[in-house]
Image (spheres, rainbow, N blue to C red):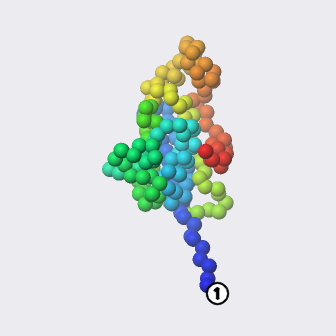
Amino acid sequence: MPKRTRKPKPSVFQLHITLKEVEAPVWRRVLVPSDLRLDELHLVLNEAMGWTNSHLHQFVFGKRTFADPDFDEGSDFEDERGVSLDELAGVGDRFVYEYDFGDDWMHEVKVEKKLPFDVRFVYPVVIGGARACPPEDCGGPLGYERLLEVLLNDDDDELVAWIGGFFDPDGFDVNRTNQALRDGP
């Protein structure tokens, strides 16, 4: 009888994601399988940061750009569905994740560590973070700063109503974020 071979578990990358161009740092630390495809990584980063996955995105690794070709077949980028993270990055490497080409939310992603797969965890898992992600469609970093000023001064009833009446820029709940990751998009 032939021996059964099990596919070895992938290693795990510890990623540190930082939202660029906002004054107070918004960041997350996430553990992901190193062989995660970029289209899957997009969903993880989107959920971990608190975005709603309602805009286009791209990854930039040096001079190579990856995105979903279903949304723009004429652009000069590679198909994100055909490549895994460990094919492009290793420990110490940094790359860019851009979300929402109108608001231009730029994220720096750093591969901090390579860890062994731990069967006690359900990957991906967020292990740290700070501050709430800006609300969708608030106008990018400059619009977000204006929104924070307005909320602090409470002098624009229409904008306060648009945001739902309450937004805590310091709020981040790692347990809620992990539940959202487990529930999926």
Given the image, on which type of amino acid does mark 1 rest?
Met
* Residue 151: percent from left, percent from top: 56, 20
Residue at the image position 61 percent from the left and 37 percent from the top: 172
* Residue 176: percent from left, percent from top: 66, 41
**Of residues 10 and 169, the one drawn nearer to the viewer in this rendering:** 10
Residue located farthest toward the bottom when viewing the structure as drawn? 1
> Could you tell me if residue 62 is visible in this image?
no
The N terminus: image quadrant: bottom right
How dense is the environment of label 1, judged by Cα within 10 Å: few (below 14), some, or many (20 and up)?
Answer: few
Instruction: Find numbered disc 1 in the image and state the secondary structure of the residue it sits on.
Output: loop
**Of residues 91 and 123, the one drawn nearer to the viewer in this rendering:** 123
* Residue 42: percent from left, percent from top: 51, 47
**Of residues 52 and 72, the one drawn nearer to the viewer in this rendering:** 72
Residue 171, above or below 111: above
According to the image, label 1 marks what residue? 1
Residue at the image position 60 percent from the left and 26 percent from the top: 167
Say which quarter of the image contains residue 92. Answer: bottom left
Residue at the image position 56 percent from the left and 37 percent from the top: 52
